Structure formats: structure tokens, C-alpha cells
Image (tube, rainbow, N blue to C red):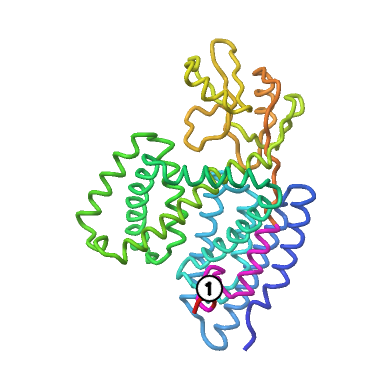
Amino acid sequence: MINIIWFFLPAILALGTITSIEDIKFGKIRNKWILSAIIYAIITNIGLIIYYNLTTGINTIYVLELITNITFATLIGYGLWHYNIWSAGDGKLFIAYTALLPLTVYSAGYQQWIPSITLLVNIFVVGLFFMLGLLLFKTRFKDLKKVLKEFLEEFFKPMTLIESIISFFAIFWVLELLLAMMGLSQSYMLRLVLTMLVFSNVKKKLGDKMIYLMSLIAIIRFSVDKSVYSWNFLLTFLMFLFTWKFLMSLFRGSLSKLGSELFTKQLNIDELKPKMILSDDIIKTNRRPTEGELETLKKNPAFQLIHQKGSYYLAKPKNSTEKEIFIKQEAEGLTLEQVNTIKKLGFKTINVSQVMPFAHLIFLGVLMTVIVKGNLLILFKTLLMKLFS
């Protein structure tokens, strides 16, 4: 019996090759390729369903999972765009690849109803290794020592660590209960990703008051969840906590700051153009920062302060919990209107991020999924067990 991946592989290779080249050369993923791939996937899947219905009989569960999987991929693609983790083009590309991949390719670490979570994990594993490789290649040894020191200080800072432990303990449990209602209680990677998004969102809205809400949920969990009183739970919890903290540092902490420093370019303000992505936040406030706040801000050479028409405008390194952002960017970069607004503020220079194309990494993640027939992390775990056995 022929493996149905062969019906989709030509379209996967064509989509991956074209979008990777265009993203690297032009920084753009065109909708016509996405739409063509999705139409091909729909026609091919309908053809296969009709064929199997006439021969061996239709697998209703398989068809239902195709629908739930595409729905999940659409929500994830939109969610990661909404939180500026990747562009709209990358999100749509993820949806197209999900449509093109038959469920049979996810055999290792199969997640019922949402098997494309495996594809998402593989894409970010590939992206993580690629980014770490670039960082190692471009970073001096003293900078690596600095970022390692900052990571450890950030990880073990008493109040931050306490807040992280309590918040992770609370949010991870609530998500477990919600996902269990959908039959997804074993989707640990999905819970990790969702915990990051929930934590960032709640922290941004509540600030320092977040700890009170998280403590209340943690107390409720201690009261009703007896599974927490075991060594097995403690070891598993610590493993997930460390993974979560590392990922948070990668996207929001010291590792992210190092990447920002390495891939940031300072421009004269008249060189700023649409589609560029600021590496700083521009904050608007009606009060002048205190002397103490100014001393802290001036420690970063990128800091700028402008006073105009009774308001103060600050350009300073990005902070995921900042509430008073004046220029809110999309993942695709600045609009022409935003560029004109920034130029009128009076800043002499501005820091922008050097955007790295991601389409080729998504394509590589897809190919790795097909080759290993599922989750890359399971392959790494198996290799490590063989190595140390």
C-alpha cells in the first residue's frame, strides 16, 4: 500500500523552495503560493477520501482529525502573529503546510486531534538550533559569559523566581483542566506554549498585582489536587519549570536581549522606512521621569527622551510588560503612518531590528517531521537514552 505522503510531497517541496527563496531575497511570502498549496491539499484530500470510501471504507475519525488539525493550525498561526512571534506570512505558511501533511507523518509522539503541534515543536527546535548557532558564531566569548551570568541572575532572582514558580504552578494546572475537557491533557508542549502566552498577557495587564491572583489559584490547587504531594510530581514540575523559564528567556529575557544586540542596527531618523521593525519601545507619558528612573534608563546607550507639546516620549529597549507603548508594531513592521509619526517626534536616531527570514526554517521543520515521522524531541530523547544506556 502506497504511503499517501507521496501525493503531497511534490507540493510541499514546491511550496518550500519558492517561499524560502522569495523570503530570503525579498522578505515576502506571497499569498498566491499559500492559496495554491491549500487548494491542492483540499483537492488531494477529497480525492483520497473518495478513493478510500469506494475501496476500504472511509475513516471518519481521520477526516474529523483533519478538520480539527487545520482549525488548530489556524488558531496557532493567528495567535503567534497576534503576539508578534512571527509574521502573518509565516503564520499562513504554517497553516498551508499543516494542510499538506497527512496525519500519518506524525506517528512518533502523535497528539490526537491536534497532531500539528508536533510540526510546531519541530519548527521551533530547528529555529532554536539555527539561532543559537548564529549567536555562537557572531558572539564574542566575553559576551557569552555576560549573557550566561544574566540568565542565571534572571533565573534565580528571588522575587522573580517566586513569581515564576507560583505562576507556572497555577497557569499550567488551569490549562491542564481546560485541555482535559477537550481531550488534550497529554499535550505538554501545547501547555508550555499556552502558559508562556497567558503569563505574558496577564503580566502585561496586572503588572506586580499578578502574584496575588496566581497565589490564590495556587492555594486552590494545593487544596484540591492531591497529585502535587509526590516526588514524581516535583521532579516533573521542576523539569517543565526549567524548560519554560529557558524558553521565556529565549523570547523575552537575557538570550533575547543578546540576539537583539547582535541583530540591531542604528539608523538616522530620516533613514527609517515602512516595513522596518523597531528594536526599541517608544513610550508616551505625561510626566517627566524621576531622576532615579532617568539614571536607570541612561545606563542603556539606546535610551532617548523627547519633550514635545506637554508630553514626554521615551525610546528604550523593549519590555514585554510595558503598558504605555505609543507605537504598537505588527510583526510585518512599521506602517507609513507610523514612520511619519516617529519622524515628527524629534528623535535623531532610532534602532531597528535586522529581520531574519523564517520561511526556510519552517520548510526545514516540515522536512524533519516527514523524515523522522514525528516529534524531533522524541528522537533526541531516544538517542540520549541509547548513548547513556
241 or 88, nearer to the observer: 241
Kind of residue at disc 1: Leu
Q: Position of residue 253 (x, y in %)?
A: 52, 43
Relative horizontal placement of residue 178, taking residue 331 as reference (left or right): left
Q: Is residue 305 magenta?
A: no
Q: Residue at x 51, y 25 (%)?
A: 296
* Count of numbered tags: 1
Magenta stretch: dominant secondary structure: helix
Q: Is residue 151 above or below residue 373?
A: above
Image position, residue 192 (x, y; %): 44, 56
Q: Is residue 301 above or below residue 319?
A: above
Q: Give the percent coordinates (x, y) of residue 145.
A: 59, 46
Name the side, left or right, on which 98 lies relative to 203: right
Which quarter of the picture shows residue 302?
Answer: top right
**Circle 1 sits on which residue?**
384
Residue 56: x and y in percent read 54, 88
Q: Residue at x 61, y 47 (%)?
A: 144
Q: Quadrant of the N terminus?
A: bottom right
Residue that sits furthest to the left in the current view? 223
Residue 383 position (above or below residue 275): below
Please tell me in which quadrant of the rendered image residue 37 appears: bottom right
Q: Is residue 136 left or right of residue 125?
A: right
Q: Nearer the viewer, residue 43 or 352?
A: 352
Q: Residue furthest top?
A: 309
Residue numbers of the magenta segment: 360-386
CA neighbours of label 1 inside 10 A, class few (<14), some (14 to 19), many (20+): few
